[in-house]
Amino acid sequence: MRAFLLSFLFATALFAAEGDWPVYGHDAGGTKYSAVSIINKRNVGKLEVAWTFHTGDIYDPKGHGKQSAFECTPLFIDGTLYVTTPFGRLIALDPETGKEKWAFDPKVDYRAGFGDFANRGAASWVDGKTGQRRIFVATIDAHLFSVDAATGKAVDSFGTGGVVDLRTGLRNPPHAKWEYEETSPPAVFGNLVIVGSGVADNQWVDAASGEVRAFDARTGKLVWTWDPMPGQKTGAANTWSIISVDAQRKLVFLPTSSASPDYYGGERPGNDSYADSLVALEAETGKMRWHFQTVHHDLWDYDIASQPTLFTVRRNGKEIPAIAVGSKTGNLFLLNRETGEPLFRVEERPVPASDVPGEKASPTQPFPILPKPLVPQKLTAENVWGPTEEDRKWCEDFFQGKRAEGIFTPPSVQGSIIFPGNIGGMAWGGAAFDPQKGLLIIPTNRLAVYVRLIPGDQFDEEVRKDEVFLSAGGSRISLEYARQRGTPYGMARVFFRNPKNLPCNAPPFGALTAVDVATGQAKWEIPLGIWPFHPDWPDAEKWGSPALGGPIVTAGGVIFQGGTLDGYFRAFDVDSGALLWKFKLPAAARATPMTYRTAKGKQYVVIAAGGFDDQPPNDALVAFALPGK
């Protein structure tokens, strides 16, 4: 009897551990894949709300600053759900009821005017000496906290009273409190906790520098620093998205962003080699092993916005350790993660030259032969779109006098149409990988952007005039302006839409694609979501929606995807992309979901529904499960 009981207890513990979601992307390689299959393609249509938890952390400035964005992907470890809020609060929840166990408050000044007012999750580490589990949370005001997972109290032995100030020790210190942020969870390797940063776009040439740093997870002492723009006055090129880790090979993979500022590069000549790159560092030392640049001398805000995804592919009878990295360009690169060599040929192709004095655009850019671009990469006056002839004609007329020569058309004083725009292509939600099917599941956005450079001596006057992009039919959409201090040009930009608030490029405006990593071919592609501003228009369900949040995939053959503007949470068949289930959330889910199985054997799927910038913010964490025990 005792042997049976021990076997039962062991099996129960293993059952619970296998159902955990211990890292932001489920695992350190960011696959977002769960082997739990209680919920599967046969029964997912029966999902219902199990519980809803409201964090209480909402900041809505009513036009004076940036509203908060609830974008967290929770962790599930040792029977507890760990949730972070935009205010940096860390909350422990009962996974079966959603009831709060404890909450840690870092007391962030949420009125400081942060540009990307979000927190996407936390990281976990166990002290091998004491067995204590700690939860690390990096807050929007750039502090790294270590919290006891059992009590919710700061671990005083870490840093100074449980916290490390990440604003100190930078090559370029921040100009303002709101310029330097932390929006993504740290990465953990061994006894190191590794953090990147978020840097405000388009403000200064010498913006805050984008160093990635590793700290001792026990003490908070700095162990190493890696600077993407060494020896330069230029800042940014920071890693604001999710860092991936290959523990076996002792490598960390950094998805870097554009150097500062985004739309004029005359003060940073050359390729800016480590910007817009996948950078592999030795995890223990911070020494660079290799790097692969996806965009040379970025002038378009074409960051690598999403977490690199680790996978293994079989070719010629051999297993190749690989990594997928996509950028806002819509180009997806599949690389050998030990060497950085492409699995499919990448070629340098000529691209348009800049006509802006002082600017020298790169004459070529890298394009993979396979996979083919996941989004269209050219918009001209001849292929603009509108549901009516009047709508199409408005877009065609606006094209007159603008530069629009396909992807990598440089910004210009007369104005340029850039497609895809600054939210992608691939956005920060990234990909999920199904190891059984060998498929990468990737949401993409397809919106063009109008960008205009403004000579510095005319900038204040232009802002005062406040160019109205759309005025017909009562619509009024002002451009976004940024000074780009230290350069001869400020900038203005706006999504390229007609007076009915419909994009001028053809739908779908968002899509979900499955890519076979062995062949580099797309297996299927579907429109993702509904353009929410015209839901009753004929064919609106085929238009798709931009998505700011990623997918997950499970052994049950189900893809779960939120992120769309229309506020629905959806489940798809991984084999075909067929819609299996959808649910209208209390607000749009600008987040990546997660799933877990409790020790009682019940599977839950959880997503944060926080709304979008043009919608009222929300604070709902919604859990779904099958009915019954």
Image: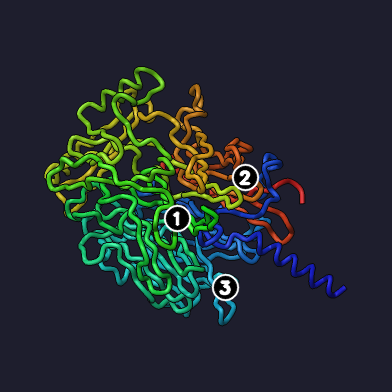
Q: Residues within 10 Å of mark 3 (few under 14, many from 20)?
A: some
Which three-letter amino acid code belongs to the residue tagged 1? Pro
Residue placed most toward the observer, 495 or 165: 495
The number of callouts visible is 3
Is residue 618 something one can see in this rendering?
no
User: What residue lies at 27% left-to-right and 58% top-to-bottom?
Assistant: 273
Q: Nearer the viewer, mark 3 or mark 2?
A: 2
Above-or-below relation of 50 to 509: below
Judged left or right of residue 434, residue 508 is: left
Seen from the viewer's position, the closer of residues 317 and 525 is: 317
Tell me the kind of residue under disc 3: Arg
Secondary structure beneath dot 3 equals strand
Q: Amino acid at mark 2?
A: Val
Choose the circle earlier in sequence order: 3 or 2.
Answer: 3
Distance of mark 2 from mark 1, alpha carbons? Answer: 21 Å
Query: Which part of the image, by quadrant, shows the N terminus?
Result: bottom right
Disc 2, disc 1: CB below 8 Å?
no
Mark found first going from the N terminus, 2 or 1: 1
Label disc, if present, on residue 486 of the rendered structure: none
Question: Mark 1 packing: few (<14 Cα in 10 Å), some, or many (20+)?
Answer: many
Instruction: Provide the residue designation for mark 1.
Output: 308
Secondary structure at badge 2 equals strand
Q: Are marks 3 and 2 in contact (CB under 8 Å)?
A: no
Residue 313 x/y as whole percent: 52, 54
- For disc 2, the marked residue is 558
Q: Residues within 10 Å of mark 2 (few under 14, many from 20)?
A: many
Q: Is residue 493 left or right of residue 412?
A: right
In the foreground, 502 or 269: 269
Tell me where residue 394 appears, x and y as whole percent: 30, 22
The residue beneath circle 3 is 133
